[in-house]
Amino acid sequence: MFHGLIDEMAQKQGVTEQLKAENQMEWVQQMNACKAQAEEIVKFELIYD
């Protein structure tokens, strides 16, 4: 579930391999943001649902 959410968010936000090749720092920042959002969603669903 966690990895699926990260992949889905990255795809929706346009985080691509091309971005990774052109601007690695931007890619890392965006992937970290996707990871943090996915963690929050999983935690919310596990704790509150």
Image: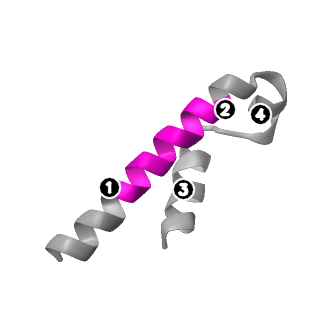
Nearest to viewer (mark 3 / mark 1)? 1
Q: Does the magenta stretch include residue 35?
A: yes
Say whether residue 27 is visible. yes
Q: Which mark is residue 40?
A: 1
Say what secondary structure mark 4 lies in.
helix
Residue assigned mark 4 = 20
Q: Which mark is residue 48?
A: none
Say what secondary structure mark 1 lies in.
helix
Give 24 or 18, whichever is nearer the viewer: 24
Report the residue at 42% width, 47% height from top: 36
**Disc nearer the start of the sequence (4/3):** 3
**Disc nearer the start of the sequence (1/4):** 4
Image vertical order of residue 42 relative to residue 9, above or below: below
Q: Give the range drawn in magenta.
A: 27-39
Residue assigned mark 2 = 27
Q: Do the residues labelled 2 and 4 touch (CB within 8 Å)?
A: yes
Report the residue at 66% width, 32% height from top: 27
- Label 4 amino acid? Lys
- Label 1 amino acid? Glu
Counting other residues with Cα less than 10 Å from the Cα at mark 3, is it few (<14), some (14-19), or many (20 or more)? many
Say what secondary structure mark 2 lies in.
helix
Counting other residues with Cα less than 10 Å from the Cα at mark 4, is it few (<14), some (14-19), or many (20 or more)? few
- CA distance for labels 1 and 4: 24 Å
- Position of the C terminus, as image quadrant, is bottom left
- CA distance for labels 2 and 4: 5 Å
- Label 2 amino acid? Trp
- Label 3 amino acid? Ile
Report the residue at 26% width, 75% height from top: 46
Residue assigned mark 3 = 6
